[in-house]
Image (tube, rainbow, N blue to C red):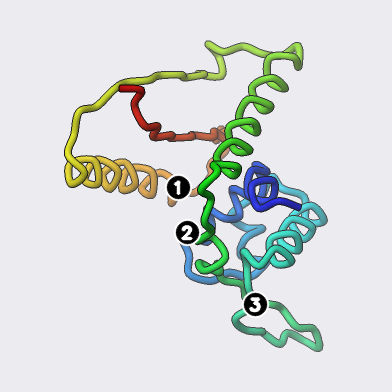
Amino acid sequence: MEMAEVVMNPVRQRIFQYFLLHETGTVKEIRKALPDVPSASLYRHIKILADSSILMVVGENRIRGTVESVYQLNKDAMATEDENGNAVQMSLLGICASFARYFSSGNADPRKDMLLFTSCTLRLTDEEFSDFLSEINQVAVKYMKKEAVKDSKTRQITLISAPPNE
């Protein structure tokens, strides 16, 4: 399975996000953070991430005769070179497929679902752009840390920076 295919799955993205917020985690801890994901599905996705070297086992907890693995993101596995842009293109296709599924489901209600699409052009120095991204990251992390409550809905946000056509 290509790296882009591995990380573009919505459940695996949420697992990945968990590890961006927590240095380590067990399946039990991840299940608590993602209560809407069935246990069998969660185990399968974690296995895919581990088999792809995105997650690595960094410890074990012995609990009444069983062994619980402690996982951590393998940051080296995520630092891949992609001069041809294949991973980016696969990611964009994954986003397009997600919207196609949404609109073909027969249940699409963009207003109710608060669908958002916006685009803007910024004229910033590299330092200013780095500050901008840092601020966006701080806001995203603030909301990623929020606990799910009764009426919480899963929402996927994608931020893409593209080179200008000048």
Q: Earlier in the sequence, mark 2 or mark 3?
A: 2
Q: Which residue is mark 1?
A: 144
Q: How many marks?
A: 3
Crowding around mark 3 (Cα neighbors within 10 Å: few <14, some 14 to 19, many 20+) is some
**Residue 63 rendering spot, x and y as whole percentages:** 73, 84
Q: The residue tagged with tag 2: helix, strand or loop?
A: helix
Spatial distance from mark 2 to mark 3, Cα to Cα?
A: 16 Å
Classify 153 as above or below 107. Answer: below
Q: Which residue is mark 3?
A: 57
Q: Earlier in the sequence, mark 3 or mark 1?
A: 3
Contact check, label 2 and label 1, Cβ < 8 Å: yes
- Amino acid under disc 3: Val
Q: Earlier in the sequence, mark 2 or mark 1?
A: 2
Classify 97 as above or below 111. Answer: below
- Pick the residue in front: 121 or 114: 121
Contact check, label 2 and label 3, Cβ < 8 Å: no
Spatial distance from mark 2 to mark 1, Cα to Cα?
A: 10 Å
Residue at x 17%, y 41% (from the top left corner): 128
Task: Classify residue 162 as left or right of residue 150.
Answer: left
- Which circle marks residue 20 in the picture? 2
**Residue 98 rendering spot, x and y as whole percentages:** 66, 28
